[in-house]
Image (tube, helix red, strand yellow):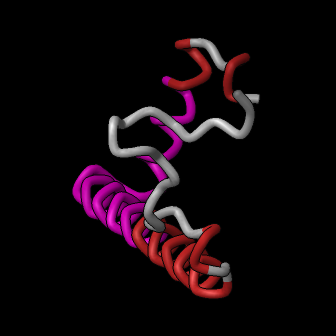
């Protein structure tokens, strides 16, 4: 949707915002929007970490990501045949 906006359309939107909010208020609004986006991203990553850690706790020890692997002492994986 925003891919179709050209330079003139963005300039018009900026001018309308400048007229509505004023020159002194625009940096404050931009800063508060930036803080809100950072807080949202941080809370989303915390939620994902919580979900992943609780899902990892429910797995049996052999299926966990941090479980010891089944490799031989030489570092090669164990083979089932041969």
Pinpoint residue 37: horizontal percent, then vertical percent.
Answer: 44, 62
Pinpoint residue 79: horizontal percent, then vertical percent.
Answer: 63, 36
User: Up-down: is 74 above or below 47?
Assistant: above
Pinpoint residue 31: horizontal percent, then vertical percent.
Answer: 28, 60
Between residues 53 and 9, which one lies in front from this camera angle? 53
- Residue 60 located left or right of residue 34: right
| Labels in figure, total | 0
- Magenta stretch: give its range: 11-40
Between residues 30 and 70, which one lies in front from this camera angle? 70
Residue 61 location, quadrant: bottom right
- Residue 10 located left or right of residue 63: left
Residue 6 location, quadrant: top right
Type of secondary structure dominating the magenta stretch: helix
Name the residue: 45% across, 76% down: 46
Pinpoint residue 11: horizontal percent, then vertical percent.
Answer: 49, 23
Between residues 5 and 38, which one lies in front from this camera angle? 38
User: Up-down: is 33 above or below 56?
Assistant: above
On-image quarter of the N terminus: top right
Name the residue: 56% across, 41% down: 78
Name the residue: 34% across, 45% down: 73
Name the residue: 41% across, 58% down: 21
On-image quarter of the C terminus: top right
- Residue 50 located left or right of residue 51: left
> Is residue 3 within the magenta segment?
no
- Residue 9 located left or right of residue 44: right
Q: Work out which residue is located at the far front of the displayed protein and give it.
A: 82
> Is residue 24 within the magenta segment?
yes
């Amino acid at each position: 949707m925003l891919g179709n906006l050209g330079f003139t359309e963005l300039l018009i939107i900026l001018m309308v915002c400048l007229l509505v909010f004023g020159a002194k208020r625009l940096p404050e609004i931009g800063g508060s929007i930036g803080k809100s986006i950072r807080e949202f991203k941080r809370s989303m990553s915390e939620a994902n970490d919580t979900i992943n850690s609780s899902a990892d706790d429910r797995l049996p020890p052999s299926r966990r990501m941090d479980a010891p692997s089944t490799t031989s002492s030489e570092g090669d994986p164990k083979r089932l045949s041969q």
